[in-house]
Image (spheres, helix red, strand yellow):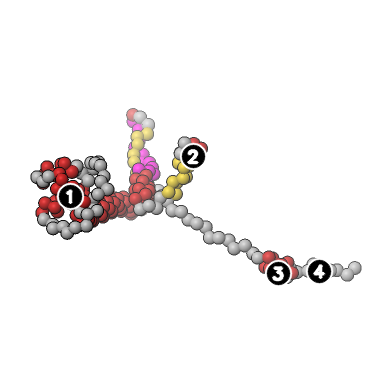
Amino acid sequence: MRFQRVSLLWGTVDQPFQWDVLKEQAAVMVASGEHLDEEIAATLDINLSTLQGWRANKIFWGRVQETIREFRVAIREHGIAIMENRLNRMNNDWLQIQEIIHARAQDNAARHPTVPGADTGLLVRETRAVGSGANQVVEDYWRLDTASLKELREMEVQAAKEMGQWTEKHDLTSGGQVINTVGYVVTPPAVEQPTDEQLSFEDNTSPEPESTDE
C-alpha cells in the first residue's frame, strides 16, 4: 500500500456524477491503495486535477469506500478458505496416521498375539543382532511409535490454535515463559453454600445424646 496526503475535501462535493469506464477504473485503483494519484492519472491518461475532482465528489468517494469494503470481505473470505483447506489437509493426515495404527494393530494381533501391547498398534517391531560370530542371533524387540504420536499431538495442537481453542499462560516473572498450555478452558460449577437457616435447621435436628440412668 502506498501512502499519500489525505484531503479533507474527499467526498464533500454533493453534485451529480456520471459514471464511465475510466471513472470505474479510477475508483478501483484508488480503493486498492496501491497507487498514488499521480500514477493513477498517468495510467488512465487523465489530468491529476480531474482525478482529484472525482475524489471530491460524494458519489465517487462512496463507490471507493464500497469497493474497499468489498476488498476486505474478499480478503477475509480468502483467509477463511485458506484456513479451512489447511485444516482439511491436516485432518486427512491425522486420519491416515490413525489408519496406519489401526492396520498395524490388526496385523500385530494376528501375528504376535503374545506380545503385550502389540495389538494397540502403537508398538513397532524391529530386529537387532545379539552376540557375535557363531553365537550371534537376531532378536525381535518392540518400541513405542513415538514419532506417530508426536505428529498426531502436534497436528491436534495446531488445529486447536487455528480454531481459537488453544490458550497459553505466560509467567511474567520469567520473561514471558510459557508455564501452562491448555486446549480447552473448563470452568468448574459453582458450589452453593448453605444458608444460615439451613445451618440452624441442621443444628436443631441433630440427635440428642442418649442419657443413661445410674
**What residue did someone put label 2 on?**
172
Say which of marks 4 and 1 sits in front.
1
- Of all residues, the one furthest to the left in this rendering is 45
**What residue did someone put label 4 on?**
210
Mark 2: amino acid = Leu
Say which of marks 4 and 2 sits in front.
2
The span from disc 3 to disc 1 (Cα, nearest Å) is 84 Å
Identify which residue, 96 or 128, lies in the foreground.
96
Image x and y of residue 16, in percent: 17, 59
**What residue did someone put label 1 on?**
53
Disc 1 is placed on an element classified as helix
Say which of marks 3 and 1 sits in front.
1
Mark 3 and mark 1 residues within 8 Å of each other at the beta carbon: no
Mark 3: amino acid = Phe
**Residue under the image location 15 percent in, 45 percent down:** 49
Mark 4: amino acid = Glu
The span from disc 4 to disc 3 (Cα, nearest Å) is 20 Å
Say which of marks 2 and 1 sits in front.
1
Say which of marks 4 and 3 sits in front.
3
Image x and y of residue 113, in percent: 38, 52
Magenta highlight range: 134-149
Disc with the residue nearer the chain's start (4 vs 3):
3
Query: Is residue 128 toward the left or the right of residue 17 in the image?
Result: right
Image x and y of residue 114, in percent: 40, 50
**Residue under the image location 55 percent in, 60 percent down:** 190
Q: Residues within 10 Å of mark 3 (few under 14, many from 20)?
A: few
Identify which residue, 56 or 132, lies in the foreground.
56
